[in-house]
Image (cartoon, grey):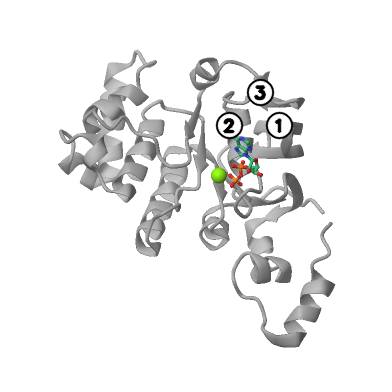
Amino acid sequence: MSAAPPSTAGGDAPVLKLLNVESAYGPIKAIRGVSLKVRRGEIATVLGSNGAGKTTILKTISGIIDPRKGSIEFKGQNITARDPAFIVQQGLSHVPEGREVFPLLSVHDNLLMGAYTRKDRDGVARDMEAVYGYFPILKERTAQDAGLLSGGQQQMLSISRAIMAAPDLILLDEPSLGLSPKLTKEIFEIVVRINRERGTTILLVEQNANMALNAADYGYVLENGRIVMEDTCARLREKEDIKEFYLGMKETGQRGERRWKKKKNWR
Ligand SMILES: Nc1ncnc2c1ncn2[C@@H]1O[C@H](COP(=O)(O)OP(=O)(O)O)[C@@H](O)[C@H]1O
Ligand SMILES: [Mg+2]
């Protein structure tokens, strides 16, 4: 089932490695033995419908939830169940679902909060200019309270705040959520540019398979807390199952139903 690493990835040492990770909310097992790798320089994606366990995976990586089982390695270091602040300091930034910005702080101050652990003031100033280059609207709104921004602008700010920490890896939780297709496309284009221009490795979780498969290099399909398929995104885009169930290209009528039974054979 698994495939060779994508040619677009820079080197093959994984920057992030999950092995058999299991996380639960009380009696509810949300992820059940998830193993995945993110290679340095790539955009990896986890696709899954609502409730599949995408957010739980990211929260477990960044230390917000402690896993019941399994291990998480980041840059060769075991970070399983470590403190979220420690994990951020190692170079891992999390852009949470629903883009949590500090609503009563200005755009500028939100960005500075992202850089609070950094001592290199010149670097911080340079990165501030860089994010204003990616998202010029944030520069226009620099003095405005973040709570007054639109949903799309808050998503831009949330991504920018992660960049301000100068991370090696960004975890990105459903950037498309609640945004128009046009805005989603814009944000995905910038995410790809950030990856290509800054070399930042990205793990993106998405329900929007279409956008994610076009932006990412390597993908995992998550169903009910389990990885059921993985491959390069180029190959995933060509798979009939993926086209039908995640890209909305399902055939209609009886033949479609038959194909559904016949083709959905990955478990
Ligand atoms: N705080 C919580 N308490 C109890 N169950 C939760 C909580 N958060 C998520 N779940 C459950 O865990 C499963 C995975 O959720 P989640 O990781 O948020 O999925 P996704 O991000 O893919 O939509 C779902 O069944 C969800 O109902
Ligand atoms: Mg989620």
Counting every numbered tag in the picture gives 3
Indicate if the residue with disc 2 has its beta carbon within 8 Å of ligand 1: yes
Measured in 3D between alpha carbons, the distance from the residue under mark 2 to the one under mark 1, in whole angstroms, is 10 Å
Residue at position x 40%, y 25% from top?
165
| CB atoms of marks 1 and 3 within 8 Å | yes
| CB atoms of marks 2 and 1 within 8 Å | yes
Q: Which residue is mark 3?
A: 66
Q: Is residue 6 above or below residue 56?
A: below
**Between 4 and 92, the one nearer to me in the picture:** 92
Among the two numbered marks 2 and 1 on one chain, the one whose residue lies closer to the N terminus: 1
Q: Which residue is mark 2?
A: 59
Residue at position x 57%, y 15% from top?
83
Q: Which residue is mark 1?
A: 23
Among the two numbered marks 2 and 3 on one chain, the one whose residue lies closer to the N terminus: 2
Indicate if the residue with disc 1 has its beta carbon within 8 Å of ligand 1: no
The answer to whether residue 18 is left or right of residue 120 is right
Indicate if the residue with disc 3 has its beta carbon within 8 Å of ligand 1: no
Which amino acid lies under the numbered mark 2 shown in the image of this protein?
Lys
Percent position of residue 216, x then y: 56, 52
Q: Quadrant of the C terminus?
A: bottom right
Which amino acid lies under the numbered mark 3 shown in the image of this protein?
Asp
Ligand 1 placement by image quarter: top right
Percent position of residue 132, x then y: 25, 40
Using the rendered image of the protein, determine whether residue 100 is visible from the camera's viewpoint: yes
